[in-house]
Every structure is written in structure tokens, then in C-alpha cells.
Image: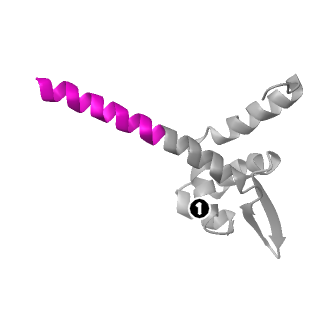
Amino acid sequence: MKNLPPEALQQVASYFQTLAEPTRLRILNYLRDGEHNVGELAQLCGYTAANISRHLSLMTQQGLVRRESRGTSVYYSIADESVYALCDLVCGSIARQYERNAKSQHAIFSRE
């Protein structure tokens, strides 16, 4: 982020904003296993196809996923695999944080 112009920082913020939605993270997890169409993702996530479609549109705009038309279906796949490294880094950090908090809670309750 160092020395990035304001316009680039806005793009970075938009990218993170896209990842800041649990449904989109679920979609990314499903796409980790391979491409899916909107109907498949809707069924996997438990949402309507219209809802999933809106999320995929934003994710496509941000360059996270790519879309490919095949006949009457559109299939989505990951466009930038580095998103998984980023998510794994953040998830690992959060897991360590939970672990520290759980140990602290356990220490507090074991004193009582």
C-alpha cells in the first residue's frame, strides 16, 4: 500500500469490501473446488439465483471470478487464485485470535 495513489487505494478498499460479505466468501469456497453455474451456487449456498447472481456480478467486476457462457448457462470460476492465499492468511490470524481468547477465558473460569 505504501506509495499508492489515492485512486489505487480506493480500488484496494473496493476489493476488500467485496470480500467483506459472508455469502461471497462462501461462493469463493465453493469455487475453490471447481467451476459452477449460478443455479448450482444458489443451491449450495441456500439462496436464490438472483441473489447469487448479484454477488457474482460484483465479484466479476473486482476480478475475483470469471464468467464463461456455454449455451444457455454461465459458469463461474476463480480468476485470481491469490485470493485464497489472502483469505487463508486472514483466517489463520482469526483462528489464532480465537485460540488466544479461548485460553484466556479458560484461565479466567478455572480460577473461579
* Residue range of the region highlighted in magenta in the rendering: 94-112
Q: Nearer the viewer, residue 51 or 25?
A: 25
Q: Is residue 29 visible?
A: yes
Q: Quadrant of residue 20?
A: top right
Callout 1 secondary element:
helix
The N terminus, quarter of image: top right
Q: Is residue 41 left or right of residue 77?
A: left
Q: Point out residue 52 in the picture as x, y percentages from the top left corner.
A: 65, 53
**In the displayed structure image, the side of residue 64 where residue 47 appears, left or right:** left
Magenta portion: prevailing SS class? helix
| Residue at position x 69%, y 36% in the image | 16
Q: Residue at x 77, y 58 (%)?
A: 79
Left or right of 28: which side holds 15? right
Check residue 82 for magenta coloring: no
At horizontal 20% and vertical 24% (from top left) the residue drawn is 108
Residue that badge 1 annotates: 30
